[in-house]
Every structure is written in structure tokens, then in C-alpha cells.
Image (cartoon, rainbow, N blue to C red):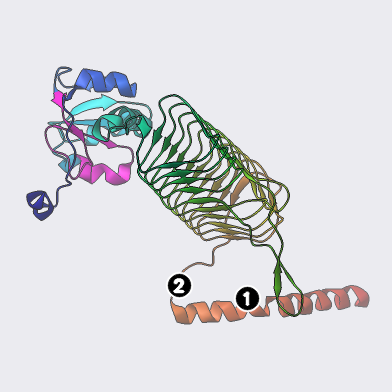
Amino acid sequence: QRQALRSGEAAVRRLDPPLSLGELARLGGARLVRGDPSLRLHSLASLEAAGPEDLAFLASARMAPAAQATRAGAVVVGPALADRVAAQAALLESDDAQRSFAAIARHVAPRLVPRPAAGVHPTAAIGASVRLGRDVHVGAFATIDDGATIGDGALVEAAAHVGAGTGIGAGTRLHPRVVIEHDCVLGRDCEVFPGTVIGADGFGFVDTGAGWEKIPQLGRVVIGDAVEIGANCTIDRGALDDTVIDSGCKLDNLIQVAHNVRIGERTAIAGCVGIAGSARIGRRCRIGGGAGILGHLEICDDVTISAMSLVTRSIRRPGFYSGVFPLMDNADWEKAAALVRRLPQTRARRRATTNNHRTDE
């Protein structure tokens, strides 16, 4: 490992036994257009780090210089970029190189990082009337409270917590230190990464003049099937109605989803997004990193929002939306900001001038 770090190469796990080029082509739905199908490869790697026993992929012309210099034994590549790959590398050609490489990686990953074995660790705490399905894994110091249900093949890893009455679907994986509070629902084949908290109280308080009084949060969090939630996200329970994340959604790390938010199926949200209470986000939306969405807004299906945008109004039509003030030299930014501040007065003067002109006519 020290030698790899000194040379700038990645330290990668090796497949044992390795996979042949022909097998890899089949797994990725790719065409072997150059190379020996019996060639055996031991790992997946980036174009820069790959060696003669590794498989890499080229999905964009931006990486073409790295492909020309790669030492990889084989490269998954689209037809338009096949001639940009170093001559010694075998070629697995695919109309969607990234998707083909992802399919291969999904097959390889369980062999590199084996799934924890089924069973309940002796240090785990299991409450009364908990129902555990077949082949469930419960890790060290995990806690499952009274009345919870864990579906077949689910994993509750070390120090994870499942609250009373919560249902975890078959095949769902809770990584270490995930917290699912009481009476929540997660569907089948979900994956939740370390540090995420699902079902904490929403931010509900009333100002009495003498201080803040808490509004009890009585709803749940309901999550559909095949939802992935990254590390250190917080998804708050509803105040009365449920917070809902539909099937197929993908959430990156460090995302805040406030109480009563609803997110439509197959929506993808990048890191550090904040969604305020009772926002409604449609299906198949894409929200860039660091974006903010104000509460009680509605975003329709098939909307893309640029990174760092602030959504202050509902979006009724599908499309690509941006609300980012461009980065520039600070002195220029101050001048531009001053102009923006004066726009309402400028608009009012122009309207007055236009109205006076019409009166004179």
C-alpha cells in the first residue's frame, strides 16, 4: 500500500478468482471488439490508476487524454470514443459505457466486500414482539425496539437503531449508526448509510411571546422501495401527515428533509440540499448540490434545478431552472449587487415614464 501511495496508484481489492474478458462483456451487456475473451482481469480501476490486469471505462471525451495514456488491460467505451483508447487495451464497446461499467461493478462489489452473515450478534438488544424475517443480520450493539418488523434478508448493522413499531422491508440495509425512529416505514431493497437519522421530530414550535413551545410531531416517515439515502442525512417525521419519499429516489449525503415534505418517485438529490417543511417535489426531478427549497412550494415532475439555486416559488412546468448569481471578482460582484438592488426603482421610473408618454399622446 505504501508503494502504491508513493507511485500515485490506487490501492484496489483484487478478485479471486478473476473474471475473463468474455464474462465481463456479458455482465455489462457490451461487445468485445478488441482483445482475447479468455484474458483474465483482477480488479476495476480508474483510467489513471489501472494496470494490465484491470478494467477501466471511458464515458466522456473529457477523459480521452487519460484513455490514451492508460495502462489498463481493458476499457469499457462507447463507439464514438473507441479510437481514443490506448492501443494495448482490449475494448468492450457499449452504447452506454457508464451503465455497462456500473452493471459490472454491481456484480463485482459483493465479491470484494462480502455481505455480513445472517444472525443476531450477542450484544444486540431485541425488544418484545419484534418480528425478524429469514436471513436477517443484526450487528453488534444494534437495538430494535418493541413491535418492530424486519423483513427477510434485511441488515441492521453495528450500533444501528430501529424504533418501536417501525417496519423495515425485505433486503433493506441499514449501515452502522443509522437511526430509524418509532413508527416509520422503509420499503424493500433500500440502503441507508451511516449517521443518517430518519423520523426525528420536525422543527415545530409556536412563539408564545414568553418563549417557544413545542408542537408535537405526530406523523411518520414513509419511504418506498429501492430508495438510497447517503450518510448523515436527516429526514424529519411529519407534524400530522407523513413525510413521504417515494420508490426509486436517490439522496446524497448531508441532506435535510423537513416535516411533511413529499418527494416523488425516482427523484435524485445531490449533497447538502435543504428542503423546508411541506414542500412537494414531483417525480423524476434532479436537484443539484447545495440547493435550497422553501417550504409549502410545489415542484412538478421532470424538473432539474442547478446546484446552489434557491427555489422561492413553485415550479409548474418541467424544465431546467437556475437561480445562481455567477461567481466573479468581488469588486465586480459588489457593483452588480448594487445594480440588482436598484432594479425595482429603475423599473418604477421606466413605468412612470412610459405612462406619462401615453398620457401626452
Q: Which residue is mark 2?
A: 328
Residue placed at 15% from the left, 17% from the top? 38
Work out whether 205 lies above or below 108: below
Front residue of 42 and 328:
42
Quadrant of the rendered image containing residue 45: top left
Check residue 256 for magenta coloring.
Answer: no
Front residue of 119 and 272:
119
User: Residue pushed farthest front?
Assistant: 128
Residue placed at 35% from the left, 38% from the top? 121
Q: Left or right: where does residue 138 sit relative to residue 64?
A: right
Q: CA distance from mark 1 to mark 2?
A: 15 Å
Q: Left or right: where does residue 106 sit relative to residue 354?
A: left
Q: Tags 1 and 2 in contact by the CB under 8 Å rule?
A: no
Front residue of 49 and 260:
260
Residue placed at 31% from the left, 28% from the top? 104
Q: Amino acid at mark 2?
A: Met
Q: Which residue is mark 1?
A: 340
Numbered mark located on residue 260 in the image: none
Viewport quadrant of the C terminus: bottom right
Residue 241 locus on image (x, y percent): 72, 47
Front residue of 122 and 226:
122
Observer able to see residue 361: no
If you read the primary sequence from the N terminus, does the residue marked by circle 1 or circle 2 appear first?
2
Residue 324 locus on image (x, y percent): 54, 63
Residue 340 locus on image (x, y percent): 62, 75
Check residue 57 for magenta coloring.
Answer: yes
Q: Amino acid at mark 1?
A: Val
- What element does badge 2 sit on? loop
- What element does badge 1 sit on? helix
Q: Left or right: where does residue 305 sit relative to residue 351?
A: left
User: For the magenta stretch, what is the residue range?
Assistant: 40-67
